[in-house]
Image (cartoon, rainbow, N blue to C red):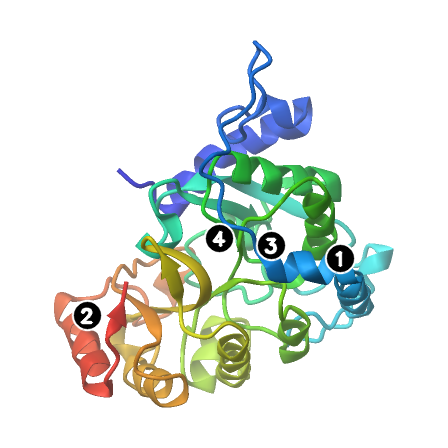
Amino acid sequence: MALSRREFIKGGLIAAGAAALGGLGAARGLFSESGSDGGTVQTANAPPASLRYLDLERSGELERREKALWELFSPCRLCPRMCGANRAAGRAGLCSSGEHFKVASSGPHFGEEAPLRGNRGSGTIFFSNCSLLCVFCLNWEIAHRGDGNQTSHAELAKIMVNLQRDGCHNINLVTPTHLVPHIVKALRLAIADGLTAPLLYNSAGYESLEVIKLLDGIVDIYLPDFKYQSAEAGIRFSQGAADYPRHAAAAIKEMHRQVGTLKQAGGVAQRGLLIRHLVMPGNTAGTDAFVRWAASELGADTHVNIMGQYTPMYRANEYPPLNRRLTQQEYAQAMRWAREAGLWNFH
């Protein structure tokens, strides 16, 4: 039975804490290491090489991209908030992240969409803190409260490589937006240690177009949310983010330009775009508008997960109609809208 995200994170926090206290080898439940008899992990089923980020590293372009991302780090312009925090001096931005970063949980995850998890799991790394801060956040303990353990670039690189050695189909970076320079720095260390797994960028969709353009050729699979279609929803439910629909639309179109429609081998995603859209009570997310946008701007073959599992979490009870579950009728209506828009790739 696949673990939910909350179950996965809760279990992973324990292991991540053990890793922080006793080294990566202490978290045996998450990371494959050499056995006590000197044997090595199984790598016969390792994912295929991502030649694009390897080529960028060999040419020196990845180093240039990393430098460009650090220039956006402080004063911080990594996300559309453009808060300007002097993070290099330890000042925290709206995302509550300063100079360093934390990992809340990591390991093979079997709760993602079928093309992402395959039969060996998605190599998921949950980063702490968030720049969007939705009032209905499912994982508010790590996104809002910042639960997790401070991690070094070398440790993050080791996590990536060990997930590959576990046979995971990809390296799944969850809530990476506010930490992209750290991630690219760790990626370069991981490449030197043999990383070849596809890189998956799993975000809330609230992205700087400048940053997404710098990720061209680095990211193999994009997994953004497109949460809602109105400025009013962004203002009310995501800390005043009136510009959420505009930035999400622009970023997702650029992601699609870079990687195209989801491409699979043996039922497992290798490259491309998959959009998540959570149907919300009272059509708060504007699902009818979203499916029309996806079909017209990206194409009817766009891969979309129209999710019907909305549950009031965190402070959702303070924000009607988000204080109730989605009804079966509302979800059925959402699926009708998708079919009427012409979309046909659902997960």
Give the mark, 2 or 3, whose residue is nearer the N terminus. 3
Q: Nearer the viewer, mark 1 or mark 3?
A: 1
- In depth, the one of 179 and 262 nearer the eye is 262
Give the mark, 4 or 3, whose residue is nearer the N terminus. 3
Circle number at residue 129: 3
In the structure shown, which secondary structural element does the residue marked by tag 4 occupy?
helix
Percent coordinates x, y for residue 208 in the rendering? 63, 76
Percent coordinates x, y for residue 268 in the rendering? 37, 54
- In depth, the one of 135 and 222 nearer the eye is 222
In the structure shown, which secondary structural element does the residue marked by tag 1 occupy?
helix
Circle number at residue 140: 4
Q: CA distance from mark 4 to mark 1?
A: 39 Å
Q: Is 287 on the left-hand or right-hand side of 7?
A: left
Q: CA distance from mark 2 to mark 3?
A: 30 Å
Q: CA distance from mark 1 to mark 3?
A: 32 Å
Q: Nearer the viewer, mark 2 or mark 4?
A: 2
Say what amino acid the circle numbered 4 marks.
Answer: Trp
Residue at image mark 1: 58
Residue extending furthest toward the bottom: 296
Circle number at residue 331: 2
Q: Residue at x 28, y 78 (%)?
A: 283
Give the mark, 2 or 4, whose residue is nearer the N terminus. 4
Q: Name which quarter of the figure residue 65 lies in.
A: bottom right
Q: Is 129 on the left-hand or right-hand side of 66?
A: left
